[in-house]
Image (spheres, rainbow, N blue to C red):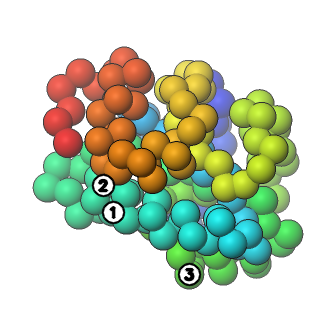
Amino acid sequence: MVDILGGRHLVTRKGAAVEAEAALQNKVVALYFAAARCGPSRDFTQLLCDFYTALVAEARRPAPFEVVFVSADDSSQEMLNFMRELHGTWLALPFHDPYRHELRKRYNVTAIPKLVIVKQNGEVITNKGRKQIRERGLACFQDWVEAADIFQNFCG
């Protein structure tokens, strides 16, 4: 993720700043474009939270996976409320970072929610992460790991 988020800070749902490079190094990254006001976003967020929890938070060996929330909310307060209410322990691009808009353009986000799975260099593994999680559950992660070409020995 050095290519697309390098040098930036991300935030936790508690508001703590985290260096993107350190947090995302050697991980498959899911860019999650969503907003609190969007019913489908709220519905999928719970499924994504369960997916993340199973892979990372409660796993005996946490998977090399991280979600970065890219908010489409109308205010920073709306974003923080959404994160605190429904999100997992993943990270977010700060609301006031104008790079949120650049990422939406770069990954052709025309509707939310959208989950784009990317390699370390920002290249898209799939822009259908939401559909894959709904249809295949945890099984889709192994495909992402293989496509990322950096974690040859992960077994989920």
Quadrant where the N terminus lies? top right
Residue sitting at x 59%, y 22%: 123
Residues at discs 1 and 2 in contact (Cβ within 8 Å): yes
* On screen, residue 70 above or below 110: below
Residue sitting at x 35%, y 29%: 143
Q: Distance between the residues labelled 3 and 2?
A: 19 Å
Q: Name the residue under label 2.
A: 56
Q: Mark 1 points at which residue?
A: 53
Residues at discs 1 and 3 in contact (Cβ within 8 Å): no
Q: Distance between the residues labelled 1 and 2?
A: 5 Å
User: Disc 1 residue type?
Assistant: Thr
Q: Distance between the residues labelled 1 and 3?
A: 15 Å
- In the picture, measured across the screen, residue 123 lies left or right of residue 119, that is right
Neighbour tally class for label 1: few under 14, some 14-19, many 20 plus, Cα within 10 Å: some
Q: Where is residue 136 in the image (x, y as percent from the top left)?
A: 36, 45
User: Disc 3 residue type?
Assistant: Glu
Residue sitting at x 52%, y 46%: 131
* Label 3 residue SS: helix
- In the picture, measured across the screen, residue 53 lies left or right of residue 101, that is left
User: Disc 2 residue type?
Assistant: Val
Residue sitting at x 66%, y 43%: 8
Q: Position of residue 13 (x, y in %)?
A: 55, 70
Q: In which quarter of the image is residue 101?
A: top right
Q: Position of residue 137 (x, y in %)?
A: 35, 50
Identify the disc placed on residue 85. Answer: 3
The furthest residue to the front? 135
Q: Where is residue 23 in the image (x, y as percent from the top left)?
A: 45, 45
* Label 2 residue SS: helix
**Pointer 3 or 2: first along the chain:** 2
Quadrant where the C terminus lies? top left
